[in-house]
Image: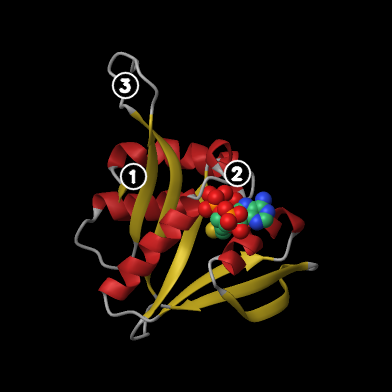
């Protein structure tokens, strides 16, 4: 199931992002700030966060939520464009990877953007070997490489900008 982020998702999302081992502390801080914007300022229109959940096997722990966070998506309109959206984060808990959860989150992103009259989704990623799976994922989801900027993050670590017309 995919639903809007709630305040109590903050810690589980950060645990999920850490578990992927793909993000620096600085990037995780940015994720925390963006989750807070989404949950504490419902009137804002810049960032939208969703989680994919998986039901827990029965019997549920006493007082347990009955679901586990499996994936996280954060996107929003790119400022000063008329229909471009940035997919700022898409991440799936390693225990749940390879089951189509990111595909479902990307489908959700496409519906979200189409529903607002948008036409282009941009996703930025790194050339590092640890992002091989991420790049394969974007290619499978019909994103094209629109730009490749050498040494962008640091020498030897390039920025790869993927995009998909929706
Ligand atoms: C990239 C990521 C989101 C994919 O999540 P996922 O739930 O495992 O992806 P899915 O199961 O939906 O896979 C969809 C497609 O992606 C591709 N893919 C996924 N894992 C792959 C792998 N190990 N090797 C090659 N292709 C792969 C496949 O083509 C797959 O299609 P298939 O099921 O027909 O084989 C996940 O690996 C992740 O969280 N990575 C770390 C975080 C990250 O880098 N996020 C992006 C930057 S913000």
**Left of 70 or right of it: where is 127?**
right
- The crowd level at tag 3 (other Cα within 10 Å; few <14, some 14-19, many 20+) is few
- The crowd level at tag 1 (other Cα within 10 Å; few <14, some 14-19, many 20+) is some
**Left of 80 or right of it: where is 87?**
right
Using the image as rendered, state which of residue 103 and residue 21 is in the foreground.
103
Is any part of residue 29 visible from this angle?
no
How many numbered marks have been drawn onto this rendered protein structure?
Answer: 3
Q: Tell me which numbered mark, 3 or 1, is placed earlier along the sequence.
A: 1
The colour scheme of the drawn protein is secondary structure
From the viewer's perspective, is residue 34 above or below residue 115? above
**Left of 88 or right of it: where is 46?**
left
Q: Is mark 2 within 8 Å of ligand 1?
A: yes
Q: Could you say whether the residue bearing mark 3 is in a helix, strand or loop?
A: loop
Q: Position of residue 118 (x, y in %)?
A: 33, 79
Q: Could you say whether the residue bearing mark 2 is in a helix, strand or loop?
A: loop
- The crowd level at tag 2 (other Cα within 10 Å; few <14, some 14-19, many 20+) is some
Q: Mark 3 highlights which residue?
A: 64
Q: Mark 2 highlights which residue?
A: 20
Q: Position of residue 129 (x, y in %)?
A: 76, 57
Q: Position of residue 151 (x, y in %)?
A: 75, 72
Q: Mark 1 highlights which residue?
A: 1
> Looking at the image, which residue is at 70% across and 58% down?
132
């Amino acid at each position: 199931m995919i639903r809007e982020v709630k305040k109590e998702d903050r810690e589980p999302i950060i645990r999920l992002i850490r578990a992927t081992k793909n993000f620096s502390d600085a990037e995780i801080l940015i994720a925390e700030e963006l989750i807070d914007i989404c949950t504490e300022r419902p009137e804002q229109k810049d960032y939208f966060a969703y989680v994919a959940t998986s039901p827990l096997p029965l019997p549920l722990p006493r007082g347990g939520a009955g679901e586990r966070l499996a994936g996280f998506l954060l996107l929003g309109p790119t400022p000063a464009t008329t229909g471009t959206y940035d997919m700022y984060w898409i991440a799936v808990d390693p225990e749940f990877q390879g089951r189509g959860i990111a595909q479902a989150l990307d489908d959700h992103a496409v519906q979200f953007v189409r529903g607002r009259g948008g036409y282009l989704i941009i996703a930025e990623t790194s050339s590092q070997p640890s992002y091989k799976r991420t790049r394969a994922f974007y290619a499978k989801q019909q994103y094209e490489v629109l730009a490749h900027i050498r040494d962008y993050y640091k020498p030897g670590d390039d920025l790869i900008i993927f995009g998909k017309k929706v």
